[in-house]
Image (tube, grey):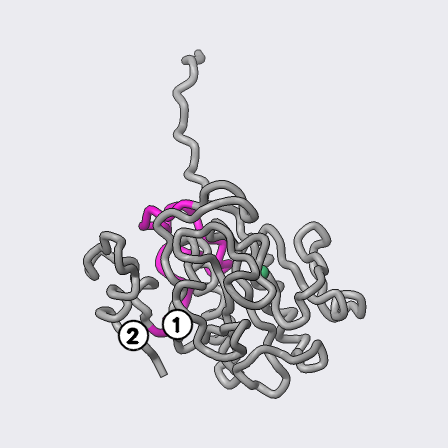
Amino acid sequence: MLVGGAGAAAAALGAGIAAPSASTLPSHALGVPARVGPPPGVPSSCRVPHSALHGRSRALGLPNHGRLANGIPFPQETDYSFTWDFPLGLSPNPQWRRYGSEKLVLTLECVLSAYNAAHPNLARVGVADLSRRGGGPFGARYGGLGHSSHQNGLDADVLYPRKDLCECAPDSPNDVDVARAQELIDRFVRAGAQYLFVSPALYRRHLLRGPPNIVIPLAFHDDHVHVRIYPDRAPRQPTSGPERG
Ligand SMILES: [Zn+2]
C-alpha cells in the first residue's frame, strides 16, 4: 500500500520550511510509487550525477559532526521499500528520523527500485535511519543504540533482506538471505558508495564481501548495512587557460 500522494508528501516535506510548491518538487519527494528504470537523469548504475539534483540540500561538515541543510525525507513507503524504526522494532520509521541529502534519497530510490524490479516476488527492502531533519547529533538520546554518524544526510541504514521474506529486521545473521544482501551491496558499490559497513559474522564467513576499502565489517551491523555516500560535488567550471598557439 502506498501512503501519501502529492498533497501529503508536500505537507510532509516540512512544517516550518518554506515548502516549494508541488509543481516544483522533484518527483521523488512526492512519494510516487516505483518507476520503471532509474530516476530522471540518473544512469542505470545509480551513480547520481550533480545534473540530476534539483534541490538545494547540502551535507555540511562531517558525518559524525555535521548538519544537513534542506534535506528531504525518504518516503515512508513505496512499492519497493518500507521504513523501519529500530528503537521500537516496527514499521514505519517516523519521518524525523529519515531526512537525507537529495543525492542520498535518489541513490536509495534508484538502487532499491532496481532491486525490486529484478525481484518483484521478493519482499520490499527496509530503510531505517537516515539523518534527523536538519541533521546534527543522532545519539542514544534519540532511541536505541543511537548513531555517532548519520549527522549530515550522507548515511542510511538498509535492512538485509530476510530468507522468510518478512518485511522486518533480521533477528540474527541466520535470518539473512545472504545472496540478496550481497546483491544489494554490489548495487551500492556500483552506485558509488564510499563505505558499506556490514555484519562481521557474515563477512568473516565470506558470505558478504566487496572491495576492501568500501565494504567493511563493523560491530552492530548484523541486521543492516550502513550505506555512506560521498557528498555531491558540483563539477568544476572550465577555466579558460592562456591561449596556446
Ligand atoms: Zn548506520
Residue 231, percent from left and from top = 49, 45
Which residue is at 29% across, 59% downward?
14
Residue 218, percent from left and from top = 70, 60
Kindly report the secondary structure that dominates the magenta region of the rendered protein: loop
Identity, as a three-letter code, of the amino acid under mark 1: Gln
Which residue is at 70% across, 55% downward?
211
Taking 238 as reference, is 153 above or below it? below
Query: Is any atom of residue 217 visible in this view?
Result: yes
Taking 114 as reference, is 228 above or below it? above
Looking at the rendering, the stretch of residues picked out in magenta corresponds to 33-58
Which residue is at 40% across, 28% downward?
238
Q: Earlier in the sequence, mark 1 or mark 2?
A: 2
> Which residue was labeled with disc 2?
4
Residue 109, percent from left and from top = 44, 65
Identity, as a three-letter code, of the amino acid under mark 2: Gly
> Which residue was labeled with disc 1?
76
**Is 52 colored magenta in this rendering?**
yes
Which one is in front, 227 or 211?
Answer: 227
Residue 171, percent from left and from top = 65, 80
Left/right placement of residue 124 relative to residue 51 reads right
Taking 94 as reference, is 192 above or below it? above
Query: Is any atom of residue 81 visible in this view?
Result: no
Q: Are marks 1 and 2 in contact (CB under 8 Å)?
A: yes
Ligand 1 contact, mark 2 (Cβ < 8 Å) = no
Q: Marks 1 and 2, how far apart in space?
A: 8 Å
Which residue is at 61% across, 88% downward?
164
Q: Quadrant of the N terminus?
A: bottom left
Q: Residue furthest bottom?
A: 164
Q: Residue furthest right?
A: 205
**Is 205 colored magenta in this rendering?**
no
